[in-house]
Each structure stands twice: as C-alpha cells, then as structure tokens.
Image (cartoon, rainbow, N blue to C red):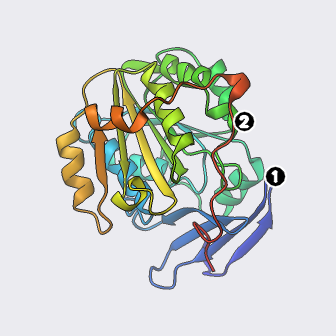
Amino acid sequence: MTDSIPVARATDSGFAKLMPDVDRARAWLLTVDGAPQSYVDLDEPTHLEFEYARRLGHVLDGVGEPGRALDVVHLGGGALTLPRYLAATRPGSRQDVVEFDRGLLELVAEHLPLPHGAGIALHAADARAWLENAPADRADVLVADVFGGSRVPAHLTSLEYAREAARVLRSDGVYLANLADGAPFAFLRSQLANFAEVFEELVLIAEPGVLRGRRFGNAVLVAARRPLDTAALARRTAADAFPARVEHGEGLRGFIGAARPVRDEDAVPSPEPPDGAFGVG
C-alpha cells in the first residue's frame, strides 16, 4: 500500500477497515465491525502495538533457541501481525495461517503485502476443520487468535478442540491463545480446565486489573507438555508499558477452582464484550 488513505470493504464476515497511523509512515490498524483486530508496521514488523500481541511475542521469543526457525500454525489471520513478526525474528520459519474470511485475506494481501520469501502460507478455511485435517506432530507452536466479531467461536472452546491442538503440536510444542473475559471468569476458567486435561504446564498472562475482576480484557493462555520459563516471562511482561502478571502453578490452580472441561455439545462462544471494551473511534 503506497498511499496512506483509509480502505473500507465488506468481507465474508463483517465490514473491514484499514486505517493509517498518522505517527508511523507505513503502519496500519485493521478493524472489523469497529473492533480492532490487528496493527501492522510494514517498515518495522517487530513492532507489536497491542498489549496482548506483545505478550504473545514474549512467549514466542522464548520458544527454543533465539532466532531458530520454527514451524508455526496460526489460527486466525487478521493483518498477519505475528506471522510477520516471526518471519523477521526467526528467518526461515515455515508458517501456516488459517483464516475463515477469504475476503479479509484478500484485502490484507492486496494492501499490506507480505515480504517476498516470508515463508507464510495462507489458507482460507475454518480453523477447527483445518486442524482436524492437519498431520500429527506438525508444529512447534500453535497460535490461536480467532474471533467471530468480538467472540471466540464455540467450536474452538471445547476439550475436543484442545486435544486436536495437542495432536498437531510436537511433544515439546507450545500452544498460545488470545482470549477475553471478565469476572466471574466462567469462560476463562473453563478454557484453562480444558487445556489442563491435555497439557502438563499452563500459564496465564493478563493485567492485574483484569485478573482482579475490575474490567473485561484480554488474557493470554499458554500450554505445553514441558516446563516453561515463567520467571523470564514474568520479567518481560512486567517491563511492558502496561505490566502484566504471569500466573502458573498453585496460583493458577486456585484461579481454575472447580471449573470443569467443556465438551463439544456444551461449548459456547466467549462472552460478548461490554460496550466500549475494545472499540475504536
């Protein structure tokens, strides 16, 4: 995209807008139906504007040796912020991006093209269906950031989905998800209960105000079958402009409480955010 002119288009699942950032020459905000979805700086792909994206970036930076190429599956595409980040920080990585909205993929490819040789394959497909057809032990990392509007679809919130994610990951692989909830956290607790059935290690990253139930907000769920360096993660998230807390071990088990895993037949979407929780003007 050469001209800093807003672009708006109806896509398969909503009304998308690309709006230029007046403070950064080739940076863009993507919104769908008024909800911010992605922020991309084409000149500086390692710049992660959204707080939750920086937290996901901190986790990704800690997977394996720094700079080592990874095999990564992204469920949810947006403007491809994290695939661009990984292509820059871990050259040679093989990445698959699964996005249900083909029109959104086409809009992003047209106006915010990927760099040549980025190693990013785009798939217009349902995330759960694509995952179920993917081979086992395919990925080092699976990143889930799927929202239908402002809600995670129900078929991506069940125990069966968590098991599919684990199947596609290698034994030392890491699962990351961007979720959103507020007190009393029925949805978030159920998601943690799902992944606790399948993975030995769980971490939750969120702002203290969100965890204390003071406001609705994003929370990053991390799951693995091996120990995670929670101390390093806590240092990095605490140093952000909006510091986050890293919960794991006994503290996280206390947060989960009596929540039980949710089967496909009982799964529901994540809660509707309150008015103004994520909107932009």
The answer to which image quadrant residue 155 occupies is top right
Residue shown at 55% from the left, 71% from the top: 28
Residue designated by label 1: 12
The answer to which image quadrant residue 152 occupies is top right
Is residue 74 positioned above or below 241 on the image? Answer: above
Comparing 223 with 206, the one in front is 206
**Of the numbered discs in the image, which one, if any, rests on residue 89?**
none
Residue shown at 39% from the left, 53% from the top: 211
On the image, the x and y values in percent for residue 278 come to 58, 66
On the image, the x and y values in percent for residue 46 come to 37, 59
Comparing 175 with 39, the one in front is 175
Residue shown at 48% from the left, 65% from the top: 42
Q: Are marks 1 and 2 in contact (CB under 8 Å)?
A: no
* Tag 1 secondary structure: loop
* Tag 2 secondary structure: loop
Residue designated by label 2: 125
Tell me the quarter of the image containing the C terminus. Answer: bottom right
Asked if residue 37 shows in the view, the reply is yes
Tell me the quarter of the image containing the N terminus. Answer: bottom right
Is residue 193 positioned above or below 75 on the image? Answer: above
Asked if residue 90 shows in the view, the reply is no
The answer to which image quadrant residue 52 occupies is bottom left
Residue shown at 39% from the left, 48% from the top: 56
Which amino acid lies under the numbered mark 1 shown in the image of this protein?
A: Asp
Q: CA distance from mark 1 to mark 2?
A: 12 Å
Which amino acid lies under the numbered mark 2 shown in the image of this protein?
A: Ala
On the image, the x and y values in percent for residue 44 come to 39, 65
On the image, the x and y values in percent for residue 166 come to 48, 20
Q: Residues within 10 Å of mark 2 (few under 14, many from 20)?
A: some
Is residue 120 positioned above or below 23 on the image? Answer: above
Return the disc, 1 or 2, that comes first in the chain's sequence: 1
